[in-house]
């Protein structure tokens, strides 16, 4: 069996949930969109069913998958519907759609609901990606509130720069939101992971925690309160000795400076490891840190072996001794993308 394994530690997921919920103090949605950021949506949702106040997913298909797995807690659809027919399935499964466009609002009100629906009404408080402008928010709110089809409304917004604790845009967005929404009754949902950690004033109502649940700080670096849920592990499965001045891998981008033992690792960009990880990106061989040399190829990558490292040694690509934010920084991306991309690995769930 190819030795690439994504160990998913569900006890770490629960630990992170408890830590984040204690920081927040209010209700918390576990964001399990995109297959729980690559960790397995059903397994993660089931592991949190005694702790979570609800879940958030991107779309109807992701929500139905959770319902079919027996999840009965509230599920928020973060993008709302793409077709008006989806409201019938939302009604059947008692899902909570976000409404972020006039078209979503009108089709929701036109639908023949069996049970009044709970709506999350999104304001564009400055990110300018989705939601009603502040001046259009109260009219949208009252259009929903006055309908018997609507059970209740949660007022929500999303931040553009919450992962930058010094950026004043978040404070501006909070003020914009408060000015337009405070006069309207109902619960509030503002914070993602970054806002929860960096902006205490966003700890109101429902928090929507994603990346931090999986143990990666959205602020970069390492947050010692969180535990990595995924440990991506492979093995050195071949080695060769090269003399000085020999190239390694595609493009011959790495040239040995001295006699070097090169280890071959079963992991490549087809598994989701970033092809742009440069020479020097950290990894760990049997607990000792080493580095990527040469280009990452589709199925394999190469590393430098110390005298005491050999074929058969375990390699941690990220997890406990190599933090995923280190790999993300080296490859000029974010932990979110690395986690979402993991595939072809064997997934092993541990408790
Ligand atoms: C994905 C998402 C979140 C979760 O964000 P994290 O940064 O992973 O905590 C929260 N809110 C919305 C609207 C999202 O789309």
Image (cartoon, helix red, strand yellow):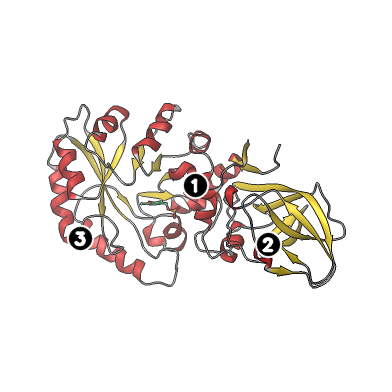
**Residue 207: % across, % down:** 39, 50
Residue at x-position 34% and y-position 55%: 190
**Alpha-carbon neighbours of circle 2 within 10 Å: few (<14), some, or many (≥20)?**
many
**Residue 220: % across, % down:** 54, 64
Q: Quadrant of residue 327?
A: bottom right
Q: Which residue is mark 3?
A: 134
Q: What is the quadrant of the C terminus in the image? A: top right
Lateral position of residue 311 relative to residue 56, left or right: right
- For residue 92, above or below residue 10: above
Lateral position of residue 100 relative to residue 69, left or right: left
How far apart are the two marked residues, 3 and 2, measured between alpha carbons?
Answer: 45 Å
How far apart are the two marked residues, 3 and 1, measured between alpha carbons?
Answer: 31 Å
Q: Which residue is mark 1?
A: 37
Is residue 222 in view from this perspective? Answer: no
Among numbered discs 3 and 1, the one appearing first in the sequence: 1
Task: Please give the label number shown on residue 168.
Answer: none
**Alpha-carbon neighbours of circle 1 within 10 Å: few (<14), some, or many (≥20)?**
many
Residue at x-position 16% and y-position 54%: 138
Among numbered discs 2 and 1, the one appearing first in the sequence: 1
Residue at x-position 39% and y-position 65%: 161
Q: Quadrant of residue 255?
A: bottom right
Q: Which residue is mark 2?
A: 282
**Residue 157: % across, % down:** 30, 55
How many numbered discs sit on the rendered protein? 3
Q: What is the quadrant of the N terminus in the image? A: top right
Which of 209 and 293 lies nearest the eye of the viewer? Answer: 293
**Alpha-carbon neighbours of circle 3 within 10 Å: few (<14), some, or many (≥20)?**
some
Of tags 3 and 1, the one toward the viewer is 1
- For residue 168, above or below residue 65: below
Circle 3/circle 2 CB separation < 8 Å:
no
Ligand 1 closer than 8 Å to label 1 CB: yes
Residue at x-position 49% and y-position 34%: 42
């Amino acid at each position: 069996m190819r030795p690439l394994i994504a160990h998913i530690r569900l006890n770490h997921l629960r630990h992170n949930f408890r830590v984040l919920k204690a920081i927040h103090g209010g209700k918390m949605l576990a964001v399990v969109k995109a297959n729980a950021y690559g960790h397995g949506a059903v397994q993660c949702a089931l592991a949190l069913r005694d702790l979570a106040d609800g879940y958030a997913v991107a779309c109807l298909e992701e929500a139905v998958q959770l319902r079919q797995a027996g999840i009965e807690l509230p599920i928020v659809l973060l993008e709302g519907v793409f077709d008006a027919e989806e409201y019938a399935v939302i009604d059947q499964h008692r899902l909570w759609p976000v409404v972020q466009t006039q078209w979503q609002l009108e089709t929701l009100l036109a639908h023949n609901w069996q049970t009044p629906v709970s709506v999350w009404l999104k304001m564009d408080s400055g990110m300018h990606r989705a939601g009603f402008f502040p001046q259009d928010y109260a009219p949208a709110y009252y259009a929903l509130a006055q309908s018997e089809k609507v059970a209740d409304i949660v007022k929500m917004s999303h931040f553009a720069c919450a992962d930058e604790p010094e950026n004043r845009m978040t404070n501006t967005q909070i003020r914009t939101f408060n000015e337009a929404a405070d006069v309207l009754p109902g619960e509030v949902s503002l914070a993602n992971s970054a806002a929860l950690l960096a902006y205490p004033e966003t700890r109101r109502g429902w928090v929507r925690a994603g990346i931090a649940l999986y143990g990666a700080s959205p602020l970069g670096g390492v947050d010692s309160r969180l535990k990595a849920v995924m440990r991506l592990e492979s093995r050195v499965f071949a080695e060769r000795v090269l003399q000085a001045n020999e190239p390694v891998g595609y493009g011959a981008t790495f040239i040995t400076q001295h006699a070097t033992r090169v280890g071959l690792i079963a992991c490549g960009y087809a598994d989701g490891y970033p092809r742009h990880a440069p020479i020097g990106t950290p990894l760990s061989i049997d607990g000792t840190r080493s580095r990527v040399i040469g280009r990452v190829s589709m199925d394999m990558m190469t590393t430098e072996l110390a005298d005491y490292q050999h074929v058969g040694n375990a390699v941690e690509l990220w997890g406990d001794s190599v933090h995923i934010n280190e790999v993300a920084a080296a490859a000029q991306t974010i932990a979110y993308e690395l986690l979402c991309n993991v595939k072809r690995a064997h997934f092993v769930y541990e408790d």
